Every structure is written in structure tokens, then in C-alpha cells.
Amino acid sequence: METSKFDIADYLDNNEMISEYLNAVLAEGDDSEVITAIGLVAKSIGMTKIAQEAGLSRPSLYKALSDGSKPQFETIMKVLRAIGGQIQISPLTP
């Protein structure tokens, strides 16, 4: 039996799945995991499309969302808008 590598981007095929995935990573992940998750969502939608909508070049988008990168907050906000998302703040519960 042949197996293939799991790729979450294959399952991020609608806005609800994307939202749930990003919210889970935001709730439990660190900054690096959040950047990686945003990159996987961008990949699932299409890097060229997201780069155009965010006003970035495709290589810049790949660089900003690559492992270990430290993109500017402005870049993250542009990409979030391009993927159809936004950040909302909720109070932490004790």
C-alpha cells in the first residue's frame, strides 16, 4: 500500500474550514505556527491569487510566509484580507 504525505491545504476548501483552522491555530499556536497556518491557507486558495489581492509579488509572499520568517504586521493584515479573514479580539476566560 502506498501512502501520501498529509497536507492540510487539501482540506481547506471552504471559508468555514479555513476559519476553524486559523482560529484553532490562533488559540493554541505560537507566532511561527500562525504564520505557517496563514501560508497554508494562502496555498490552498492559490499563492498567485493571494499575492495579487494583497498587493505583493508572489516571491515576496512566499518569503513572508516561509518557515522562520518574521513578516511585518501590515503584511499579515494584507494577506488575511486577501484570504477573506480578519482578526477579532475576545476577552480571555479564566
Image (tube, rainbow, N blue to C red):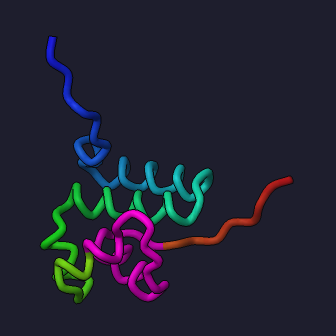
The residue positioned 61% from the left and 51% from the top of the image is: 28
To which quarter of the image does residue 81 belong?
bottom left
Whether residue 1 appears in magenta in the rendering, the answer is no
Q: Residue reaching furthest top?
A: 1
12 left or right, relative to 75: left
The residue positioned 31% from the left and 56% from the top of the image is: 40
Q: How many marks?
A: 0
The boundaries of the magenta stretch are 62-86
Depth order, front residue of 68/28:
68
The residue positioned 35% from the left and 70% from the top of the image is: 65
The residue positioned 64% from the left and 71% from the top of the image is: 89
Relative image position of residue 31 (x, y in whole percent): 55, 66
Whether residue 77 appears in magenta in the rendering, the answer is yes
Depth order, front residue of 84/39:
39
The quadrant of the picture occupied by the N terminus is top left
Depth order, front residue of 17/54:
54
Relative image position of residue 72 (x, y in whole percent): 46, 86
* 44 relative to 80, above or below: above
69 left or right, relative to 59: right
Relative image position of residue 85 (x, y in whole percent): 39, 69
To which quarter of the image does residue 55 belong?
bottom left
